Image (tube, grey):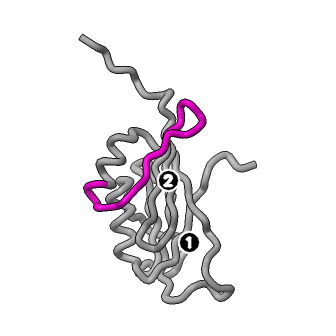
Amino acid sequence: MIERIGHINIKTPLFAETCAFYEALFDLRRVPALTMADQERNAWLATAEGQPVIHVNTGETPAPSGPARLDHVAFECRDVAAMRARLDALGVPHVHAVSRVPTLEQVFFTDLNGIRIELTFDTANIPQSRSS
């Protein structure tokens, strides 16, 4: 059974730019793509704990079967306000939505490869601020 997303793969002619975008947005770091022979054309972007979540590889043309059918990728995140500020700082247009689920907020945007991204935030786990 699936417990969580393992990783996404982005095949792009914008290799360096895509790596830099996701490194800046999610505080990921580039680590060797050990399953790939050509490290100049492949990278894993990993969390601070070393968990690879995005595999970026070069690709000049769409897949042989035509354009990819990936609709979107969803990531579970923390701190909706900080993420929206980061998207603003990177100049990334985004839409903030409050879900029908009372404790769920979402942010939607499209990356530079045209991939739709959904970020979900569980607001039930946010510590309540104390009033003076």
Label number found at residue 110: none
Question: Where residue 46 sits in the image (x, y, percent)?
Answer: 44, 57
Image point (49%, 45%), residue name: 106
Q: Residues within 10 Å of mark 2 (few under 14, many from 20)?
A: some
Label number found at residue 51: 2
Image point (51%, 54%), residue name: 118
Report the span colored magenta: 88-105
Dot 1: what SS?
A: loop
37, 26: nearer the viewer: 26
Label number found at residue 35: 1
Q: Earlier in the sequence, mark 2 or mark 1?
A: 1
Decide if residue 73 is on the left or right side of residue 64: left
- The C terminus - image quarter: top left
Dot 2: what SS?
A: loop
Hey, which quadrant is residue 9 in on the image? bottom right
46, 63: nearer the viewer: 63
Question: Where residue 81 sits in the image (x, y, percent)?
Answer: 34, 40
